[in-house]
Amino acid sequence: MRTRREFLIDSMKGACASCIASGLFLAGSCSVLMAREKDEKKYTKEAMYYEKKEEMKILCKLCPRECSVADLERGYCGVRENRGGIYYTLVHSRPCTYHVDPIEKKPFFHFLPGSTAFSIATAGCNVECRFCQNWDISQFRPEQLESIYMPPETVHAMAKKSGARSIAYTYSEPVVFYEYVLDTARLGPETGIRSVVVSNGYIQEKAIIELCQHLGAIKIDLKAFTEKFYREVCNGKLEPVLKTLLAIKKTGIWFEIVVLIIPTLNDSEIELRKMSRWIRENLGPDVPVHFTRFHPTYKIKNLPRTPLPVLERARDTARSEGLNFVYMGNVPGHESENTICPSCKNTIIKRYGYLIMNMDIANGKCGKCARTIPGVWS
Ligand code: SF4
């Protein structure tokens, strides 16, 4: 049986032949399609974490959505396709964007501060947050975006050339380009460049545990602390994200949490207190938590950016629940960007936005009282 793809190519060849015969010139479009087909193969690799089912269906077990996908169809994320009962990722080595960013932009505040991260993303996401800042790549399919061929070795070579100390998988959702992340991160021990993932944590346990074995750090967006928010605003679920955080904690890898505070949607003191308490009781008091400022975008343009007092209240609530490293984000120059020693209150790292202004830390210890500051410092 011919695939849909083969059918399209054959149709185009036929169209070209008849156009040439009739004097029309369509060879350009035919060669473009052939080139695209060749390109497609470079980006296609059998997916991990799926089960084969009857009638050439597959069940994707990579994320909690567990898409059941019929032949020639794709899962919800739009970047994984069933071809004849075999499931493929269509975005291996296919970033649609890359930049060199300060690691503080991810944000990681306790991981190689002052260094840069070579940052890449492909199309696709497994949720749809109505406030997504990168919706123009996360909510598109790979064919709809310009992309380049960048296999794992090239990612490392470009990262090295740029002077970056890490590779960040970010902007869209690394879970949906899992195989690319894993193959790239695995080269870390050879090149000396560590990998960090910036994720929504919407992934199944086995997959996150395998991934963490190859990462230097991971940042999880905890988008709220109610199922209602996850369901209505993100088309996702909270419970799997909490399970992911527990799994990450067990692996021992360094991780930080970001909470984007959106006025009226997830900013109540009760919710933030419950969240902070859960973090302290289950993940410990030393996990950094960043409360960041929302700016109207994508499908939430009717709400204002987060007022400063709301962010400060979130910070104070988390501190009062016993969290040691609570930050505010997207507020350059605010004192809550700094890292303060929980023991002697010394300012260990002074920041301005993504810039490091001063550091008073040696071998992972406070420069004043020698308290160990959790993180990855070298
Ligand atoms: S990774 Fe994509 S295809 Fe797999 S379950 Fe999640 S949304 Fe569905």
Image (spheres, rainbow, N blue to C red):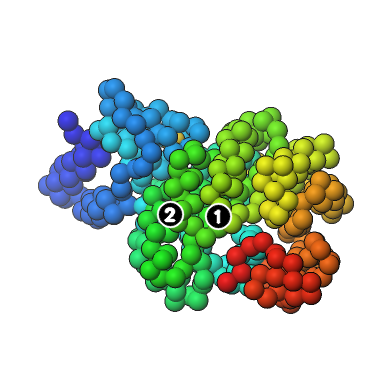
- Which label sits on residue 253? 1
Q: Residue 314 or 274: which is nearer the viewer?
A: 274
Q: Pick out the residue farthest to the left.
A: 21
Q: Can residue 218 be seen?
A: no
CA neighbours of label 1 inside 10 A, class few (<14), some (14 to 19), many (20+): some
Q: Are marks 2 and 1 in contact (CB under 8 Å)?
A: no
Q: Quadrant of residue 95?
A: bottom left
Residue occupying image coordinates x 32% and y 38%: 87
Q: For this view, does 292 lie left or right of residue 65?
A: right
From this view, report whether residue 298 is shown above or below residue 72: below
Q: Identity of the amino acid at label 2?
A: Val
Location of residue 128 in the rendering, given as x and y in whole percent from the top left corner:
57, 39
For the N terminus, the quadrant is top left
The residue that disc 2 covers is 181
Secondary structure of residue under mark 1: loop
Q: Quadrant of the C terminus?
A: bottom right
Instruction: Say if residue 35 shows up in the picture.
Output: yes
Q: CA distance from mark 2 to mark 1?
A: 16 Å
Locate residue 171, reporting x and y percent.
55, 54
Q: Is residue 253 above or below residue 206?
A: below
